[in-house]
Image (tube, rainbow, N blue to C red):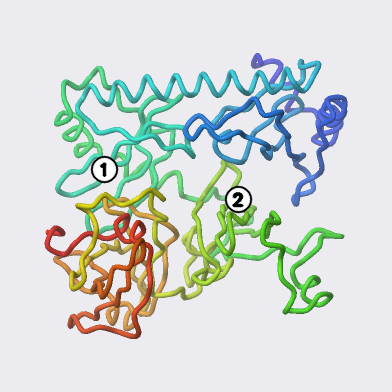
Amino acid sequence: MSEGEHTIISKIPRERLNQIAGRKLASLAIPVRLGADRETLEGELLFSGVLRHPATGQVLQRARFQVRGHDTLHFVDPPLAALPPVSFYDCERVSALEQRIAEALQRRVRQLQEQAARLKALGFEVTVDGERLAARVVVKTPTHAFELLGGAEGIRVSRVAPVGGHPFDVPASFPPVRPEEHASRVDVEVWLAQRVPELEQAARESSRPALTPTSTATPARLEAMPPPRNAVTLGQLVRVFGEAGVLAPSAPVEVVQEFQFAGTRYRFSAQRDVGTTFRARLIGPAGDVWNDKFDLANFPGTASVVAAALGVQGAPVASAEPELSPGSGEPVPQHLLPRAGETWVMNVVLEGQQGEEVRYVGTDIDGRPYGAARVLKRSDFEAVFTRAGSGWRLLVVVDQVQGDQVLYRQLDPHRQPMGAPRKMATAVLVANFVPEAAAF
């Protein structure tokens, strides 16, 4: 679209754009509806079985989308969320649109492969992030860990985790890493270390809320929005069916709630994966703000998670146990298996301290922050976590190894067991903890 066409489109009322888009999508037999903001058209596209996830090979059956302007779809579910908006207005059949999406996926994969090859040529160990469709590298220096993602936008720094400091996300507008300008992996590490002040400044500027004429000094509050008219709420279901009713074991479930913070709307969505395990996302105007898996038994509550993800001061207190990466789901290699009597550790990173509260986030074995941040009273935090140099650790002792499960107990700062033994999948332990002897 040319600049002149964009200017014309921007002057057309939103309602009229929605009418144009809705009529075209209806001709393609794609139903749409107004979203919770009563302005954005959204819907779900069903596929014929041709599309497959580039990373897993699984057939993509459906994907939710939002309409941009009058002629493009922006997908909100991974992996299609990694694609740029897809034009639909010139498609005569839905099969043509599906083919266009397949071609966009193929282009994204080629871009991923090209960036992965460049990173490997510099000596990096590259993994594929199947959700974001990007080549991923973690670069560690004595003072920081940098997450690099390679895709359509080139190779960019996406997240920085200072050792013992506050991790932060880097906006996509920050200049990319140019492999052709670096002779080796060491050159990249030096370049990143020199860019830290600029990365911090870019992160501060991107997170600074825009000022409006009505802005005041009053801190922004997280506000749960009322459900749309005629929506079916969980409260209604409980009142009608009672608390003893159960969900069918294989039935799909999605729970949605809208929040507003600092004048911006956010949508929390939790879709059941299997059993009591859900995959949750917090979606803002620019896409995902946070996403993770959780089990109902360990979930601290929607408001608590949303507040923590947005960095709202005074967020509700969460559980003392950090969130755990789910692990690979594959058998654990023999040489990585834990043994009874061993002490394993997981590092946590402090994101902030205010008064008598501590805000922290767990890290995986690569030192990458994982999951939503948690907030605890300082006394509770210090009763569970052990100081290690400038950082903190959670210690557990392995009592028994039973097949693919581990019985363990948490240790207090004096290395004394706390509470009754707990059970954890061996793959989860290995994905999040390391033996104490190897942690230094």
On the image, the x and y values in percent for residue 88 come to 73, 22
Task: Choose top left, top right, bottom left or bottom right for residue 296.
Answer: bottom right
Q: How far apart are labels 1 and 2 at the CA level? A: 28 Å
On the image, the x and y values in percent for residue 374 come to 42, 67
Q: Front-most of 263 and 143? A: 143
Quick one: quadrant of the N terminus?
top right
Q: Residue at x 35, y 44 (%)?
A: 159
Quick one: quadrant of the C terminus?
bottom left
Callout 2: helix, strand or loop?
Answer: loop
Q: Residue at x 79, y 70 (%)?
A: 237
Q: Residue at x 78, y 43 (%)?
A: 39
Identify residue for label 1.
Answer: 197
Q: Is residue 174 above or below residue 389?
A: above
> Is 251 left, or right, of 314 in this rendering?
right
> Is 267 left, or right, of 333 in this rendering?
right
Q: Front-most of 82 and 199? A: 82
Identify residue for label 2.
Answer: 212
> Is 112 left, or right, of 251 in this rendering?
left
